[in-house]
Image: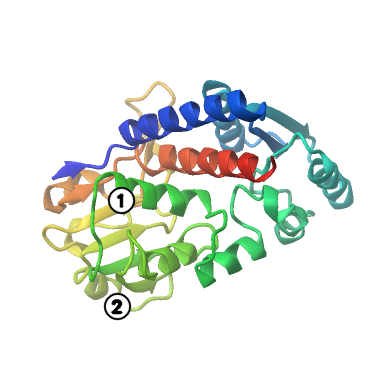
Amino acid sequence: MQLLDGAAVSAQLKSQIKKETEELKAKTGKVPHLAAILVGNNPASEAYVASKVRTCEELGFGSTLLRFDTSITEQQLLDEIDNLNADDKIDGILVQLPLPEHISDDKVINKIDPTKDVDGFHPISLGKMLLGHKTFLPATPYGIMLMLEHYNIDVTGMHCVIIGRSNIVGTPMTILMSRNAKPGNATVTMCHSKTKNLKEITQTADIIIAAIGRPKYVTADMVKEGAIIIDVGINRIPDATKKSGSRLVGDVDFENVAPKASYITPVPGGVGLMTIGGLMKNTLEAAKQHI
């Protein structure tokens, strides 16, 4: 079993991004700038945004964090995005989800200028991805593809089972894994909460991408020997041995699945770090396009 080390891969990726950023600034004076919008004080969202802002500083990017109370109206938030769309200094815009119930995620995502959609969620970005055109890929799927590329894992002809059908991870992964590219050319099966014979399907998988949001959902009896396991899940469960009273686990029962796997991502330290790497790579590309 080999660990797919998100920390090591993302460190190398960030080093390359920082080098390209310095070259871009020296050549054109352009500094990539990411604007993040945070509504409310959800602890997980706070942590995610803080990590992204820190990474911007580390890479030499500019960053702007706009924080709003949950009382902000949908129209006020859309107006704030309009302001960012019109600001030539801003290269990338991300809105940290989830948003309060009175604000439509779709309306907010659709309002972002597609040339600044570094999260890759805009319908235009997703449509271009489907057609195989150059575009911003959703950050988590992009990070997974970069990890597979780094470890030179050739998934051509493999049976890839994706558990989860969200627009953020599951659905984009089906497109990326099956397209005629490298990594790619896998035969993909998408499973979800309504799949009846999930275990029978996963037992045939050469690679499993678990993104269903349920702690330790993928168990050892669901995995064949030598399978590649990509765990997208980040779940907090009670743990009395920890000072915080809880710990993070993935959607895969790591301890019992790992001995059967040829490759596996840990949680934490796996896909989550690659997601930020994918976001930063998109932001750098956006800055280059805005020169």
Would residue 55 be visible to someone looking at this image? no
Report the front residue among 19 and 238.
Answer: 19
Quarter-of-image position of residue 90: top right
- The residue that disc 2 covers is 197
- The residue that disc 1 covers is 148
104 sits to left or right of 160 = right
User: Which amino acid is tagged 1?
Assistant: Leu
Q: Secondary structure at mark 1?
A: helix
105 sits to left or right of 152 = right
Residue 66 position within the rendered picture, expressed as x and y whole percent measured from the top left: 76, 32
107 sits to left or right of 60 = right
First in sequence, mark 2 or 1: give its number.
1
Q: Residue at x 59, y 23 (%)?
A: 26
Quarter-of-image position of residue 30: top right
Q: Is residue 261 shown above or below 29?
A: below
Q: Is residue 33 shown above or below 70?
A: above
Residue 157 position within the rendered picture, expressed as x and y whole percent measured from the top left: 23, 71
Residue 245 position within the rendered picture, expressed as x and y whole percent measured from the top left: 42, 28
Using the numbered discs, state the Cα–Cα distance from disc 2 to disc 1 in whole angstroms.
Answer: 28 Å
212 sits to left or right of 257 = right
Quarter-of-image position of residue 141: bottom left
Residue at the far bottom: name it. Answer: 196
